[in-house]
Amino acid sequence: MEKTLVIIKPDGIERGLMGEIISRYEKKGLKIADCKMIEADKETLKRHYVEHKGKSFYEDLIIYMTRGKVFVMIIEGSNAIQIIRKLHGKTNPLEAEVGTIRGEFANSVTENIVHASDSKDSAEREISIWFS
Ligand code: IDP
Ligand code: MG
């Protein structure tokens, strides 16, 4: 069964959206295989976001992700990686489709509530970072 790494970011927790978000995965037929609520340390986040190192938003991204707890999950199911990316919507709030998590709840390019792996390789890599 395909697995993906999902994070509810600090704004999702602050705004009380955890239940709303998790229920969407469950209603879609996906399974929460593992989960934990933690304060992410900078080293873990730097490994997680290595592809963005050096970009203009990188420092703000790390500050944002460490300002409160995050809820990290391994989610499994048929086509879990692509399905979750669809449920989340596009990164840019102007492009996030109505009905998606970002489309409904986010209006910031940085603070966009959720993270999900974007490929099989990144899912495997990210799962090993957060659940080693
Ligand atoms: P994704 O989360 O949809 O996969 P990525 O391009 O991988 O988007 O970017 C990772 C995270 O970095 C985004 O979710 C968002 O929090 C932040 N981010 C991405 N692009 C920008 C930007 O142009 N300005 C500010 N923050 C950004
Ligand atoms: Mg990404």
Image (cartoon, rainbow, N blue to C red):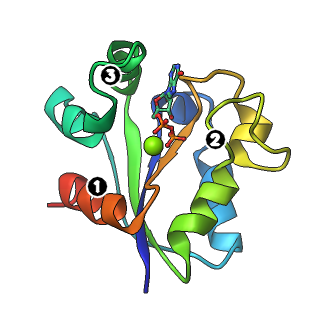
Q: Nearer the viewer, residue 38 or 55?
A: 55
Q: CA distance from mark 3 to mark 1?
A: 16 Å
Marks 3 and 1: CB-CB under 8 Å? no
Residue 117 location in percent, x, y? 43, 55
Residue shown at 61%/36% (left/top)?
A: 91
Quadrant of the image containing the N terminus? bottom left
In the image: residue 50, left or right of residue 112: left
Residue shown at 43%/79% (left/top)?
A: 2
Which amino acid, by three-letter code, is at mark 2?
A: Leu
Quadrant of the image occupied by residue 24? bottom right
The residue carrying mark 3 is 62
Q: CA distance from mark 3 to mark 2?
A: 21 Å
Q: Which mark is residue 104?
A: none
Secondary element under disc 3, as helix, strand or loop, is helix
Residue at the outermost bottom position: 1
User: Crowdedness of circle 2 by 10 Å Cα count: few (<14), some, many (20+)?
Assistant: some
Which amino acid, by three-letter code, is at mark 3?
A: Ile
Residue 28 location in percent, x, y? 69, 73
The residue carrying mark 2 is 17
Q: CA distance from mark 2 to mark 1?
A: 23 Å
Q: Nearer the viewer, residue 60 or 70?
A: 60
Q: Nearer the viewer, mark 3 or mark 2?
A: 3
Which amino acid, by three-letter code, is at mark 1?
A: Glu
Return the disc, 3 or 1, that comes first in the chain's sequence.
3
Residue 32 location in percent, x, y? 47, 70
In the image: residue 106, left or right of residue 35: right
Quadrant of the image occupied by residue 97? top right
Q: Which mark is residue 126?
A: 1
